[in-house]
Amino acid sequence: MMIKKLALFLFFLVFSGLLLAQESNGDASVEKKVFIDNLLSKMTLQEKVGQLRLVSVGGDLTLHKVLDQIQAGEIGGIFNTVVEPDLFQMQERALKSPSKIPLYFGFDIIHGHRTVFPINLGIASTWDRSAIAKVAEVSANEATTDGLNITWAPMVDITRDPRWGRVSEGFGEDPYLTSEAGRIFVEKMQKQSLADKKSLVTTVKHFALYGAVEGGREYNSTDMSERKMFQEYLVPYKAAIDAGSRAVMVSLVSVNGIPATANHWLLTEVLRNQWHFDGVVVSDHGAIRELINHGVASDPKDAVRVAIKAGIEMSMNDEYFLQFVPELVKEGAISEDEINQACRHVLELKYDMGLFSDPKRNLDPTLDIDTMFADNRLHRAEARDVARRSIVLLKNENEILPLAKNKKIAVIGPLADSKRDILGSWSGAGRANLAVTPLEGIKNAVKNPESISYAFGANLSDDENLYRFLNLYGETTKFDNRPADKMIAEAVKIAKKADIVIAFVGEAEGMAHESSSRTDLSLPATQKQLLNALKKTGKPLVIVLMNGRPLTLSEEYAQADAMLETWFLGTEGGNAIADVLFGDYNPSGKLPISFPDNVGQIPVYYSHLNTGRPRGTENMGKYTTSYFDSPNEPLFPFGFGLSYTNFAMDFSLSSSEMNKNGEIIVKVNVENIGNKEGMQTVQLYLQDVTASVSRPVKELIGFENISLKPHEKGEVEFVIKYDMLKFWNDKMQYVAEPGKFNVFIGSDSTTQNKQTFTLLD
Ligand code: BGC
């Protein structure tokens, strides 16, 4: 009896709690609507347009001019300023504008803020949700401490063409891995409530398909079937929006013949009508003007009309909105309702951020530059932890790694001591002088730094044009004018005296950035010559790669005794590299993108469709899908990465059949069969064997990490649910079709470790 009463009482408590919560939510949203309706009703058209303008200080637009425009109510948001006293001053002026609407402040926080984490390809290489979460949390904390409210991240463009420089900014080739990273960024940056002072609003970008540009050429066109879009390329944007991202940035490219900025289908039919996105749609930098070059607008005024009609709301780096929107409204080419709706989205966002009640949140007008960039504001421990998890061991012949700390080591190469490069691109609020280079990291790790010798060895390249390109807006990459053979001789000299040679080669950070497409993905000749000379010394050679995209490395792979992919690891990069080289951390990274054997294979990715004539081995593969001068397979496949230990895996399915409401449990036994503690990423792939459309040979649908001591056994479990079997069928319906499915478990995408089940009718 007592228990019954208690249960009833508890039920009552929970139920009334729910009702109260609903009511107060309801009240809050009514309050918000009343507030915004009221505000909108008092705003002039000019002011409404002002809210749609995103502006940054620079060039002709001096701080003075920007402040005047702010006070006139002509600017809604500021980006690219991270100096708090300036932001404070701007906000004060906004509060003196006719409607006193606060500004919001944005910045590109792509892989860290003051503390720079690895570039996103590196973050994705961790295959570790908690590491990704750490990056997002620390970045949001640092950015909001700096008074920022919104970021233009996460960048979740699927990238399968390493010729494109922005490959470095994404999370690789796979929709599932990229979606997971994007989702975590959104959840951890925005937090539970935007009103949280540490919440940073995310802007998922670049919607859509920027990563699929023709030939990897920057700002180019994309053309893709709707099936491929919905099945693969659009998935990560949708995942970020479903996770609650309150803003979307539109890509600079054309999508099936229509620039994304002018693409009503993309921005309105898909984004708003199908996906029910109710946040703010931001154009990319200068995208409105570019509609004229794209050939879909005749002049600036027409470009504004076309963009707004398609669904653009805020204009980034706006030049034309203020000038032309009022005129276009007057002429009836766009309606005031359209502007009201866009302005409402911006005001709602500001309201939810809590800016109307606390416009100067996190802004300290007295903060000086030294404090702003102070070392004690950095999160070095977190940066080092994520950085070492991002490193991928590609080769380790004769277990040459890890190294003993008492060896004589020659550290060589143009990237071995470069503070700027290790930060990677998009690290605007970071400071190179605070970064740890590999040489510094190695010296920090050993007991006797005297045992470490160093030589620059070679310039990154001898192509003058490349240096002009890299240093166009200020010197970032120094060219050493000494003769090449002299530099090589110096390197060889120290190599000969050492027990082991570690060569740091790859790209300057500026080679893997926006607007840095390449057609040749091999190491430039200067670096190859250096490696050849080092190889000739006969000393064990460890090649450590620093680069922002997959390179073609078959020669270097053959030369190296051991090879590490370290991307650009950020502030703590050098220490993280040393952790792995000396075995203080057992490498666990896995490639989030395939490395082509040669450029001609591109695109090369693991989740391709099967063909009527799969690659055969007989008769030299003739009349099957193959090249006669190259393998089909990449040099390093998606998901690949070694460890200092070895793991064995086997697995079972809970059933060989599944129905609509059922599920299959995949139990994986993992054993560390080596003699070092280590972490393995267990990867789960699925293949729908027969369907109404051809399905990929394999698709990643899950991954989990397990850490095991030597000879320890452990278990990882996955659950395959009906929804995970769905795809866009021959009628473009998102369904699962009955039939046979192959389940693969492995440590990379080439696994053939397979079990089968049938989805029943
Ligand atoms: C890039 C965006 C970036 C914006 C603002 C553009 O050039 O394409 O990704 O967010 O600049 O910095």
Image (spheres, rainbow, N blue to C red):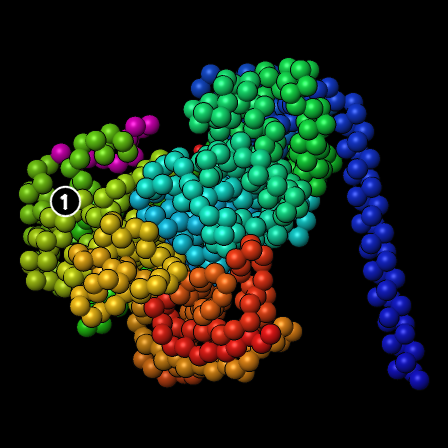
Where 406 falls versus 216 (above or below)? below
Q: Position of residue 362 (x, y in %)?
A: 62, 39
Q: Position of residue 311 (x, y in %)?
A: 60, 33
Q: Give the residue at x 35% y 62%.
A: 611
Indicate the amino acid at tag 1: Ala
Residue ID for mark 1: 525
Question: Residue 532, can we see it?
Answer: yes
Q: Which residues are magenta?
A: 471-481
Q: Position of residue 8 (x, y in %)?
A: 90, 74
Question: In the rendered image, which quarter contains the N terminus?
Answer: bottom right
- The quadrant in which residue 696 appears is bottom left
590 is within the stretch colored magenta: no
SS state under label 1: helix
Choose between 685 and 371: the one closer to the eye: 685
Q: Position of residue 484 (x, y in %)?
A: 9, 40
Q: Give the residue at x 64% y 18%.
A: 328
Q: What secondary structure prevails in the magenta region?
A: loop
Choose between 268 and 22: the one closer to the eye: 268
Where 305 falls versus 550 (above or below)? above
Choose between 479 and 666: the one closer to the eye: 666
Where 207 falls versus 322 (above or below)? below
